[in-house]
Image: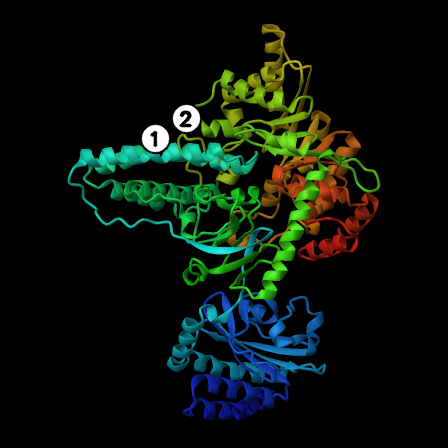
Amino acid sequence: MKTKALSQAMEILKVVRKITESSDLAQVKLEKVTKAIAQSFKSDSAAFYIAIDNNYLELFAAYGFKKDVNNKVSLRFGEGLVGDIAKTNRSMVVKDVLKHPKFVHIEELEDQQYKSFLGVPLVRRSRCIGVITLYSKKTREYTPLEVEIMETVALVLAELTSSEEMATFRNRIIKERGFSGRERIKGLSLNKGYGMGIAIVHHRRQMVNKIFAEDKEKELRRLNVAHAQMNEDLDEKFNATKLGIGEHTEILDAYRMFAKDKGWYKRISDNIQSGLTAEAAVERAYEDMWNRLSGTQDTYLRERLNDLRDVADRLQSYLSGDYKDPAKQVDSDDIIIVAQNLGPAELMDYDFKKVRGLIIEDGTPTMHVAIVAKALNIPVISKTRGLFEEIKTGQLLAVDGDENYVYINPSVSVQERFKVKLAEKKKLQEKLLELRNLASKTSDGTRVGMYINVGLAFDLDYIESTNCDGIGLYRTEIPFMAADAMPDVDTQTSYYKQLMDKAGNKKVIFRSLDVGSDKLLPYWSNMNEENPAIGWRSIRITLDRRAILRKQIRAFLRAAEGKELNVMFPMISDLAEFEDAKETLLIELEKEKKKTGKTPKKVNVGLMIEVPSVIFQIEDILEKADFISIGTNDLAQFMFACDRGNPKLTERYDILSSPFLKIMKYIVDKADKAGVYCSVCGEMASNPIEAMVLIGLGYRNLSASGSSFGRVKSMIRSINVSEVSEYVQSLLKSSQKSLRPQLIAYAYDHGIEIY
């Protein structure tokens, strides 16, 4: 077979070589080669894709299609059959393309008329530089011999594609067409939704032109003025912006704290004293921190570096006097921000009521600006390398966060489609407002408790605006992170009492101090752990430093005087750890009774299920705990041994997979059998499709982010519990990597509102 394949390949290569050695233009050569290959394999059509960078392929030559499609089709590595070949560097034979799970319809090719497909990668130095494909309208199975022949031809085509002539032609086309004529670019959605507006290309970094200072005292005065003005403006900006409550406000508060950090400011001052200008001193302080932390795999520290870059750039702009409103570049009420990177405060520099979308070249769902954008209902797309360099301020852009696409200068038909989607979104928002006074009850009458997750906030509007059942998670660490020193008992009591008063008679669940890992306190020394996510953090810290835990418990007890108090301990790894923490609380309760007699009318003690080891002790734990709450973020991270902040692993594992769902069902079944209150307070409860699955598994208490509350409640009111439960449990034996596609299809087929 090898000899026969080589012989047939040689015949095709003779034709290819004759074409490549001709005096024809590069485009003509590509078209002739594509036609020759299609005819040699007796195929109806053929397409020759060339990689324009490490992320995208473009169709440079085609044969047999009805339309002129050259330079009109662009695919991301991993997208569709062709993209999958480029991503894996593997050939692909498909007998029926319409039934293949990787098939993505390409309108320009009218590819739904074809049945069979053969695609082979062009590989050079282990990197895909192109893909050659064959299409047949009749069902046929390309044989292993044909695949061998095609792969042999591909070796020569790889050399042709890499030649100086073709490289020059390719670069010219890219430059002339600007993104090679692509109207649609696929990225990764960090927040769903639709938006259309005028592009503003966000430039952040200030160039340092003068390094050495002539007058140190003058530079120090300039620094003092710029630093004071920057912080004054940040305070005004954040305090004037009503964002409700949640993780986004925690981030903005932490950012503001970071901008006021005395240690960072002292390093800048010391750099000026050594002879640098204020601008150079700021840059040196950043570079020193970057050199120490750039190699870290810790999510929080990476985000701290991004925040530090943002703060440094912001201070530079105040030193130069160039800190004007960036949105004034464009006179429009609808803008799309395009950035290589963006800090949360930089996003707030724009009038967020005008921001219709955010495009970041690289990013993950945990990056701070994405979390803030989510709270503002701004769709966010990332993984768009090269877009920042090509887009110009003033261009019309459309962002589809549901399907992960960015449209550049969208056609009239695309614009009309977006207008319809935006009108639907407006109706949805109006509908969600109507849900406020409706019961959180399924269509077949099952009541589901709906709570919200809360952090330190400028206000507690979500409690009233959502009409929730209570607060399923109050993150008590935020006051600690926002303070310059450890808050004393009275200070903590005032924080917690404010929340209790606002909640009225609604349930409030306090989580004890959860610091370490990605949440560091400015007044604690750096722990320098190699693996902080599974290191000295959370309850491990407060049990070791028992005075901190005792003071916080005292504040809980005093804030909940005469009311019901619910306290849960995070990061519990075994029963003994929980018993130790619970005993500390009960001792403090007895002390308060003897000292003042003013205590809560009832005290419930629970824990978060985040560490897989406690699942093996769940029955014993349920005998001791008054309630449990599952923190799905950490539980999934530890179960899959997967850093959820690592962009390389963002889509590798799915909580909507059989292993994770089996664990979740096991926990709730055990809790129900023991008669113990059980809830979910992780991100899983904030996503309608995932919350639907939780209800199907048996969960009846969910605590979501305030911004997601309405969507989850709408889903609840549209489902039939018995039907969903039966379907979800039928999937638990599946070996598929993700059950998400089937679950989404089920929701659509049964009219379940998961938008």
> Is disc 2 in contact with disc 1, using a CB cutoff of under 8 Å?
yes
Q: What is the three-letter code of the residue carrying label 2?
A: Asp
Q: In the depicted view, which residue is nearer to us: 479 or 94? A: 479
Could you say where residue 625 lies in the image, as x and y percent from the top left? 69, 26
Q: How is the image coloured?
A: rainbow
SS at mark 1 in the image: helix
Could you say where residue 734 lies in the image, as x and y percent from the top left? 74, 55
Q: In the depicted view, which residue is nearer to us: 5 or 172? A: 172
- Residue at position x 55%, y 92% in the image: 7
- Residue at position x 71%, y 40% in the image: 713
Could you say where residue 484 lies in the image, as x and y percent from the top left? 41, 26
Residue linked to disc 2: 484
Whether residue 472 is visible: no
Q: Residues within 10 Å of mark 2 (few under 14, many from 20)?
A: some
Q: Residue furthest left?
A: 214
Q: How far apart are the two marked residues, 2 and 1, measured between alpha carbons?
A: 9 Å
Residue linked to disc 1: 262
* Residue 41 quadrant: bottom right
- In this rendering, the answer to whether 645 lies above or below 5 is above
Image check: 285 left or right of 382? left
- In this rendering, the answer to whether 535 lies above or below 496 is below
Q: What is the three-letter code of the residue carrying label 1?
A: Lys
Q: Residues within 10 Å of mark 1 (few under 14, many from 20)?
A: few
Q: In the depicted view, which residue is nearer to us: 518 or 734? A: 518
Could you say where residue 440 lies in the image, as x and y percent from the top left? 75, 36
SS at mark 2 in the image: loop
Tell me the quadrant of the picture where the N terminus can be found.
bottom right
First in sequence: mark 2 or mark 1? 1
Whether residue 661 is visible: yes
